[in-house]
Amino acid sequence: MHKRPISLAKLRHVPQQFSWVDQRLVRERHIEQLGHAACTLYLFLVTVADAHGLSYYADPSVCQRLAMTGAELHQARQTLITQGLVAY
């Protein structure tokens, strides 16, 4: 299967000050705007992403692995989208 990024402008690049999780999360204060569910989802997505930052986990699988309801997942994802941290 050929995968295509949703947004070429949002492709992840390893910054010079390498960190497994993008340091902008703290430096740009995004983490202060996120609840626990959004932080959990962000860490999960970063962990399971391929080299282009793409993940293909279905919502039921994500909910099961993160012990979230569908509504909690939707809200967490929307928060990450609003903060510009993920494309969906």
Image: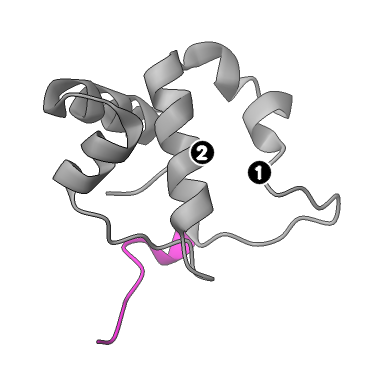
The percent position of residue 2, horizontal first and vertical second, equals 28, 86
**Which quarter shows the N terminus?**
bottom left
Task: Say which residue label 2 marks.
Answer: 43
Residue lying farthest bottom? 1
| Image x and y of residue 60, in percent | 15, 43
Magenta span of residues = 1-9
User: Residue 34, percent across and down?
Assistant: 47, 17
Say whether disc 2 or disc 1 marks the residue closer to the N-terminus: 1
Taking depth in this image into account, of 81 and 3 the one nearest to the observer is 3
Q: Quadrant of residue 73?
A: top left
Magenta includes 6?
A: yes
Mark 1 Cα shell of 10 Å, populated few (<14), some (14-19), many (≥20): few
Left or right, residue 37 beside residue 74? right
50 shown above or below 79: below
Q: Is residue 36 visible?
A: yes
What is the three-letter code of the residue carrying label 1? Val
Report helix, strand or loop for mark 1. Answer: loop
In the rendered image, which residue does mark 1 sit on?
21
Instruction: In the displayed orientation, state which residue is furthest to the right.
Output: 17
Judge left or right: residue 14 versus residue 16: left
Residue ID at (45%, 16%):
36
